[in-house]
Amino acid sequence: MTDTELAWAALGGDPALLQRITTVVREGALPSRLPVREVARACVGVCALAAAEWAARRSGPAEVPQVRVDDGAVATAFHSERHLLVDGREPVNFAPLSRFWRTADGWVRTHANYPHHRERLLAALGLAADASVETVAAALAERPAVEVEESVYAAGGLAVALRTPWEWAAHEQGRAVAAHPLVGRERLDKAPVRPLVRLDGDPLLPLAGVRVLDLTRVISGPVATRTLALLGADVLRIDSPHLPELPDQHADMDIGKRSAALDLTASADRRAFENLLVEADVVVTGYRPGSLDRFGISAEQLAERRPGLVVAQLSAWGAYGPWGGRRGFDSLVQVATGIAATEGAPERPGSLPAQALDHGTGYLLAGAVLRSLTEQTEEGGTRVLRLALARTAAWLTDGAVRNAGGAQDAGGGQVYDGPEPWLAETDSPLGRLRYALSPVRFAGGPVDWARPAGRWGQDPARWQPDPRGN
């Protein structure tokens, strides 16, 4: 089974529709030891196919539109945070304390891009708030890697010890992840069949009139929701005013969306959130498993208050196993699951050519939402989707075995010469933006977002009027 076949099966798609996908293979796109290009292409391909299928369902053509997946577009989009320019300025993607460190017995990687994560890392190490890179390096060099991992997590920070694929496979969390499907799909109730509102227009926007409540941060969830925005959804991102987003990350990841700040501990803001939920079609969450339950935002609680929702939940490690409640990011998952050891060398760990777990899982999640909407027109029901970066990592590392016989492609005669054909520019409230175009394409569909990112948290917390008058 190819990676695209595997991903489409994970979404519950009709295998006969796979013939609608054509691929432009380019040598040099996402080079790595693991089959990153194949997995990335599969995630984008099934997302685009799910969009085409839903577009056909809503607009009524005789057949599902053709999907075209270009390795160049995929590679460029998987580096979108690196290609961003704001008034000609390059973004800052990793803070000085987000990096690999030598420990007394190996390596550890930390993530400290957000100020509160930096503070917790330094507190766990017993260091001053203004500690230098050299001071941190000296402190970590004296401690075992797993001890650092546990003490930093206990303090609310983020650090992961380097493991080999075999060590992860033997780890309790690794075993728990391997026991779950790539895409968890569940029907919670017998909510009525979703009404099918017909579409027309050029370009064809399959998600026109669909309202998406976006409760995600940091690449993977935002990739999914900006893809839904590309396809016409009204996507409203909600953040706490006490947890502002990094400006460059917002400029890249929130294109096509609106952004509002609500404090769910405040009664007025809580009422505003509940009013949004009443008319939402999709809720996407990307916070640590269980962290939103106190606000009534578990899948089961949402289903009780808004039957017929699609609830998509994203986590780093999965909502199960001993690490089920831990925070995590792509770079850390690569380290724990053996990817960094595979891509590196004995003298230093390596990394994937892009944050492919984040981006790939994001497109897979968007595709799962689209397929759930299609299924709801046939069977109804509140739908719950659960994806995890660590499970996507298992798919990728298993690909080394799948492709051991030579199935990993070596290119198709064309070469990835750079990102320029898949970049665009626009003016925005944030300045002049250069950004990567979406790789999700189907015949007659959109090629760019209808709006750039605005200012973080400055949009009203209400839905836009439905252009169809519903």
Image (spheres, rainbow, N blue to C red):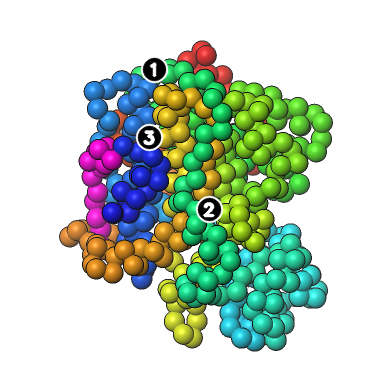
Could you tell whether 360 is left or right of 253 in the image?
Answer: left
Q: Amino acid at mark 2?
A: Ala
Could you tell whether 385 is left or right of 64 in the image?
Answer: right
Residue 41, position as x, y percentages in the image:
34, 52
Q: Residue at x 52, y 14 (%)?
A: 470
State which region is magenta: 15-27
Q: Amino acid at mark 1?
A: Arg
> Which mark is on residue 198?
1
State the residue position of label 3: 51
* Mark before the other along the chain sequence, 3 or 2: 3
Q: Foreground: 390 or 78?
A: 390
Could you tell whether 23 is left or right of 202 in the image?
Answer: left
Q: For the N terminus, which image quadrant?
A: bottom left
Is 219 contained in the magenta span?
no
| Residue that lies at the very extreme toward the left in this rendered image | 413
Circles 1 and 2, Cβ within 8 Å, touching? The answer is no
Is 18 contained in the magenta span?
yes
Image position of 244 with respect to 272: above or below: below
Give the mark toward the camera: 1 or 2. 2
Q: Residue at x 68, y 37 (%)?
A: 297
Residue 102, position as x, y percentages in the image:
60, 82
State the residue position of label 2: 388
Dot 2 crowding, Cα within 10 Å, few <14, some 14–19, many 20+ = many
Q: Amino acid at mark 3?
A: Ala
Q: Foreground: 317 or 110?
A: 317
Residues under labels 1 and 3: Cα distance?
15 Å
Residue 255, position as x, y percentages in the image:
51, 41
